[in-house]
Amino acid sequence: MLTEDGKHLYVSYDEYHNLIEKLALKVYQSGWEFDTILCLARGGMRPGDVLSRIFNVPLAIMSTSSYRAKVGTEQGNLDIARYITTPKGEIAGKVLLVDDLADSGHTLKAVIDLLKNNYKPITELRSAVIWTKQLSSFVPDYSVEFLPTNPWIHQPFEGYDSMRPAQLLEKWQL
């Protein structure tokens, strides 16, 4: 649900999963076949997992991080992991890069540049996200929703960003 001022988008679990399914359909209807999904952790892990199951291809993971300040609401310096975790030795062939959104576009562009320059076994690379903000400098190959007002997206699991084990214990004490 987008707020009236267009500055916040609140997404329920059902909406989130429906959007992932719509992303899967966009990729499928394009006719492009790929060998592996590479998701960017953390935002791309949930969509990457679902797409990996739907398309029955291996899921590789690359960790990136830029949203650490103020409980994940403020973008900082981009950190990209040195290694990709993959069940098949090294990542190769046609790869679908998955993240949750193209916000500034900086992360996706940096990762794609890194992959093209350092992972020669990748023969083709395409990108897929749920949301693309207007301010993004990067345009993914596949995207479900274009957000012209660049809202902050409140994903259904973000409550865990500020929850700590002691709070969880307090919640579940009987």
Image (tube, rainbow, N blue to C red):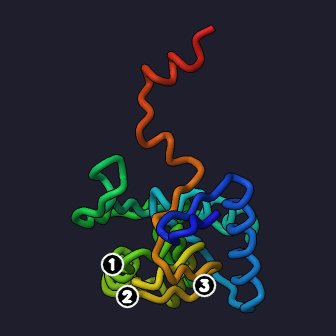
Element at label 2: loop
Residue type at mark 1: give it.
His
Mark 3: amino acid: Tyr
Residue 129: mark in rendering: none
Is any atom of residue 82 visible in this view?
no
- In the rendered image, which quarter contains the C terminus? top right
The residue to which callout 1 is attached is 106
Q: Which quarter of the picture shows residue 88?
A: bottom right
Mark 3 neighbour density, 10 Å: few (under 14) some (14–19) many (20 or more): many
Do tag 2 and tag 1 residues touch (Cβ < 8 Å)?
Answer: yes
Residue that label 3 marks: 142
Q: Is the residue 108 above or below the residue 42 in the image? A: below
Relative to 146, is 153 above or below? Answer: above
Residue identified by numbered label 2:
137
- Residue drawn at (46%, 76%) of the image: 150
Q: Are marks 3 and 2 in contact (CB under 8 Å)?
A: no
Residue 29 occupies which quadrant of the picture? bottom right
Which image quadrant: the N terminus?
Answer: bottom right
Marks 2/1: CA–CA distance: 7 Å
Q: Earlier in the sequence, mark 3 or mark 2?
A: 2
Between tags 3 and 2, which lies in front?
2
- Residue 3 drawn at (x, y percent): 57, 64
x and y percentages locating residue 118 in the rendered image: 32, 81
